Image (cartoon, helix red, strand yellow):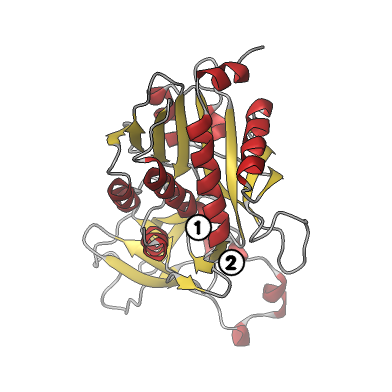
């Protein structure tokens, strides 16, 4: 598989919560060796039936943080609201794409030049409700006349770029890197024979509350679940952690805001990583993963989130390192091959 192409396709794709169609189309192509089905919110499920072993769900959300058109001023500027978490300071002056029914429009989140900022304005964090998007309208042709309507989705515009040391800059690494892991695992396991039935799931609307994770898990009824998403690289500009860094390997997330990982699954993952010499580290994360919902479905599902360390998420440009992606694909593939009814029984024997 051409990974650079996979990364570029996925990160440049348009896909804020509720508008994941383009990302889903890419995933459908990369997961086509498996049987494809969908939940009714649009999550894509790629399944491979095993030999009577446990049902394993691996979830990666397809959506990215973006914006939605709230209003169009009479001067033709676009007022907007965030979908997903944004910090106002990283938004000003950034390029965006507004998708109307017929056309994608390029624009910029307008900022005031420093020359005319008053001293007190310079010290203040700007309010998102005061911001606007300028798509280059001039008086006689406003945004409305161009076919832009309330509810139209907006994403950051960023060209995928290869940097030094296998570090890649792109928008939406949260969570297109997880989607890329699904593609990598599918490639690894398509021709392998293993006991479990595997469901690789591209979920929708994670950034607004893990919605597709819930609906797809209710459909699949998994016995064991993993979520793959970014974790935080705490290495820039000063190291704040010894191992949570770009190049730190796969993060085994022992706890986040929405769940305590299955202790037994953590130990299983650690043992496999040691055995296969896969670089990994343990991490606790503020925030949540798709497993935050999945582990509560039905009678409960032993679950474990895995993270790929990333810098600068929820902004126009974030970084990941290819080796951390490789480690995640390797660990997941090895765990999936090893899980069987016996190991599953140990996870739920109380
Ligand atoms: Zn995410």
Q: Where is residue 99 in the image (x, y as percent from the top left)?
A: 31, 60
Mark 2 Cβ inside 8 Å of ligand 1: no
- The residue beneath circle 1 is 173
Residue marked by disc 2: 90
Q: Quadrant of the C terminus?
A: top right
Badge 2 or badge 1: first in the primary sequence: 2
Q: Is mark 1 on a helix, strand or loop?
A: helix
x%, y% of residue 194?
A: 42, 30
The vertical placement of 266 against 108, above or below, is above
Classify 10 Å Cα crowding around label 1: few (below 14), some (14-19), many (20 and above).
Answer: many
Residue 185 visible to an observer of this rendering: yes
Q: Residue 342 carries which label?
A: none
Say which of marks 2 and 1 sits in front.
1
Q: Determine whether, in the image, residue 310 is placed left or right of residue 149.
A: right
User: Which image quadrant is residue 118 in?
Assistant: bottom right
Mark 2, secondary structure of its residue: helix
Task: Compare residues 299 and 244 and report the one nearer the observer.
Answer: 244
Q: Residue 254 location in percent, x, y?
A: 69, 37
**Viewer-proximal residue, 338 or 256?**
338
Residue found at the very far bottom of the displayed protein: 115
Q: Which residue is drawn at 36% across and 73% down?
A: 135
Query: Which residue is at 35% across, 71% downward?
Result: 106
Depth order, front residue of 80/54: 54
34 left or right, relative to 161 = left
Rounded to the nearest whole Å, what is the CA distance between mark 2 and mark 1?
16 Å
Task: Look at the image and tell me in which quarter the N terminus lies.
Answer: bottom left
């Amino acid at each position: 598989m051409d990974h650079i192409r996979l990364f570029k396709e996925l990160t440049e794709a348009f896909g804020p919560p509720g508008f994941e169609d383009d990302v889903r189309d890419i995933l459908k192509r990369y997961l086509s060796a498996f049987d494809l089905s969908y939940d009714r919110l649009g999550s894509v499920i790629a399944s491979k039936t095993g030999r009577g072993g446990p049902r394993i769900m691996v979830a990666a959300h397809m959506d990215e943080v973006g914006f939605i058109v709230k209003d169009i001023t009479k001067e033709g500027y676009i007022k907007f609201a965030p979908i997903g978490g944004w910090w106002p300071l990283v938004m000003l002056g950034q390029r965006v794409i507004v998708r109307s029914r017929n056309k994608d429009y390029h624009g910029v989140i307008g900022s005031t030049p420093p020359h005319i900022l008053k001293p007190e304005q310079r010290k203040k964090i700007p309010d998102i409700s005061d911001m606007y998007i300028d798509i280059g309208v001039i008086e006689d042709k406003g945004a409305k006349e161009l076919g832009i309507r309330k509810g139209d989705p907006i994403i950051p515009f960023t060209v995928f770029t290869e940097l030094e040391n296998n570090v890649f800059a792109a928008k939406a690494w949260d969570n297109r890197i997880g989607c890329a892991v699904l593609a990598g695992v599918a490639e690894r396991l398509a021709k392998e024979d293993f006991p479990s039935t595997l469901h690789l799931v591209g979920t929708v609307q994670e950034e607004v509350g893990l919605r597709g994770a819930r609906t797809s898990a209710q459909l699949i009824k998994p016995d064991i679940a993993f979520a793959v998403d970014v974790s935080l690289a705490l290495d820039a500009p000063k190291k704040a952690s010894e191992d949570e860094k770009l190049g730190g390997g796969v993060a085994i997330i022992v706890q986040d805001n929405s769940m305590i990982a299955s202790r037994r699954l953590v130990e299983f993952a650690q043992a496999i990583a040691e055995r296969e010499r896969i670089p990994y580290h343990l991490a606790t994360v503020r925030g949540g993963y798709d497993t935050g919902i999945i582990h509560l479905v039905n009678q409960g599902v032993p679950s474990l989130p895995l993270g790929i360390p990333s810098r600068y998420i929820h902004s126009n440009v974030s970084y990941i390192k290819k080796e951390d992606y490789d480690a995640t694909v390797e660990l997941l593939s090895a765990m999936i091959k090893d899980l069987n009814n016996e190991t599953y029984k140990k996870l739920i024997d109380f």
